[in-house]
Image (cartoon, helix red, strand yellow):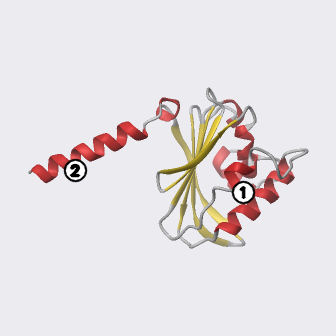
Amino acid sequence: MNNYFMQLGCIFLFLILNSNPAYANMQKCKTAPLVVTAKTVGTVSYYADNCHQNWESQNIQLDFSYDQNIPEWAFKKAANYYLKKNISNFANDSVLNQITELYKPVKKGDLYSLAYSQMNQQLKLSLNQKLLGSITDPQANQYFKIWFGSSPFNAKLKQQLLNQ
C-alpha cells in the first residue's frame, strides 16, 4: 500500500512540475502520419488554443511520435533546409538554429514535443518529456514554418494537421 501512495505522489509531483498554464487549455486538433520518402516513420499531433484559429497567433504544440530510429543529423539537415525555404533572409546564425542544434537521435517509441507560448514568445523542445532547451524571441513561432510554411516538409501533412 505504501508503494501505491509513493507512486501516486510521484505522478502528482510530475504533473505539478511539468504543468505550464500557457499550454493547459490547448486542445488536440489533429493527428496525421509522419511520412518520409514514402515511408511512415511515426505520427504528428497538432495542439492549439483554438483549432480554427491561425497557428501564428496562438499557443501551439506539435508532438512527434516515432516508429523508426532517426539520426540527429537528419533532423538538423531537414530543419535547416526548410527554414531556409520558408523564412526570407534566414541565416545560419539565426536564433531559431539554437532549437535545431538541440536535436538528438530518436529510436522507436520516442516523442519529440515542440511547444510555443505566445505570451512569452518562447519555443521549447522536449524529448520524451525532458526539456532539451528553449528560445525566447519575437519570431520563435516561425520555426513551425518547417511544417506550416509555404514550402513545408510535407504538403499533405500540413493539410491534414491544419485541416485545409
Q: Is residue 155 visible?
A: yes
In the image, what residue type sits under mark 2? Gln
> How many numbered discs, if any?
2
The tag earlier along the polypeptide, 2 or 1, is 2
- Front one among 9 and 160: 9
Q: Secondary structure at mark 1?
A: helix
- The label shown at residue 43 is none
In the image, what residue type sits under mark 1? Lys
How many angstroms separate mark 2 from mark 1 (CA)?
42 Å
Q: Which residue is mark 1?
A: 156
Q: Could you tell me which quadrant the C terminus lies in?
A: top right
> What residue appears at the point 83 percent right and 52 percent down from the top-left corner?
92
- Front one among 48 and 88: 88
Residue at the left extreme of this rendering: 1
- Front one among 119 and 154: 119
Residue at the right extreme of this rendering: 89
User: Viewed as shown, does residue 9 lie left or right of 61?
Assistant: left
> What residue appears at the point 23 percent right and 43 percent down from the top-left corner?
9
Q: Secondary structure at mark 2?
A: helix
Q: Could you say where residue 139 lies in the image, as x and y percent from the top left?
A: 75, 36
For label 1, count other residues whose C-alpha is less than 10 Å away and answer few (under 14), some (14-19) or many (20+): some
Q: Which residue is mark 2?
A: 7
